[in-house]
Image (cartoon, rainbow, N blue to C red):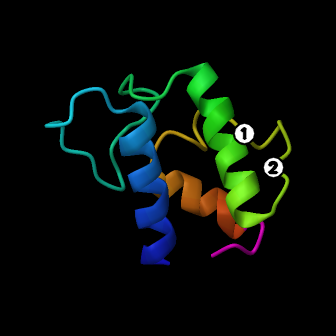
Amino acid sequence: MSGIKEVILDYIKEEYLEDEDMELDFSSPLITGGIVDSFSMVSLKRFLETKYKIQIPDAKATPDAFDSVDNILVLLKEFNVV
C-alpha cells in the first residue's frame, strides 16, 4: 500500500507543488490547503484512472475524497486497487 501512496504523492509533488521546499506528506490537505484546485483534481482523477485502470464516477470524485493522499487511498480501496 505504501508504494501506491508514494506514487500518488510523487505525482502531486511533480505536477502541482510550486514551492519545492514545501513539506508534503500523506495527510497534507491538498484541496483545502490550496495545492490542488478543481482543474487539478480532474487531472489527478484521470491520472488515477489511467494508472490503475479504473473508472471513478464523478459522484465519488469529491473534494473531500481528494483532500489528502490518505483520503485518495480510501477511495481507491473501493475499486480494489489497494
Residue 76 percent location from the top left of the image: 67, 63
Q: Which residues are magenta?
A: 78-82
Could you say whether the residue bearing mark 2 is in a helix, strand or loop? loop
Q: Residue at x 62, y 21 (%)?
A: 39
Q: Position of residue 81 (x, y in %)?
A: 69, 73
Tell me whether circle 2 and circle 1 mark residues in contact (CB < 8 Å). yes
Relative placement, left or right, of 73 versus 36 is right
Q: Quadrant of residue 75?
A: bottom right
Above or below, 51 against 12 in this view is below
Residue at the far front in the pictured view: 14
Q: Which residue is mark 2?
A: 56
At x 67%, y 53%, the residue is 48
- Seen in the picture, residue 74 relative to 12 is either above or below; the reply is below
Residue type at mark 2? Ile
Q: Quadrant of the C terminus?
A: bottom right
Element carrying mark 1: loop
**Residue 51 placement (x, y as % from top left):** 68, 60
User: Residue type at mark 1?
Assistant: Ala
Q: Which mark is residue 16?
A: none
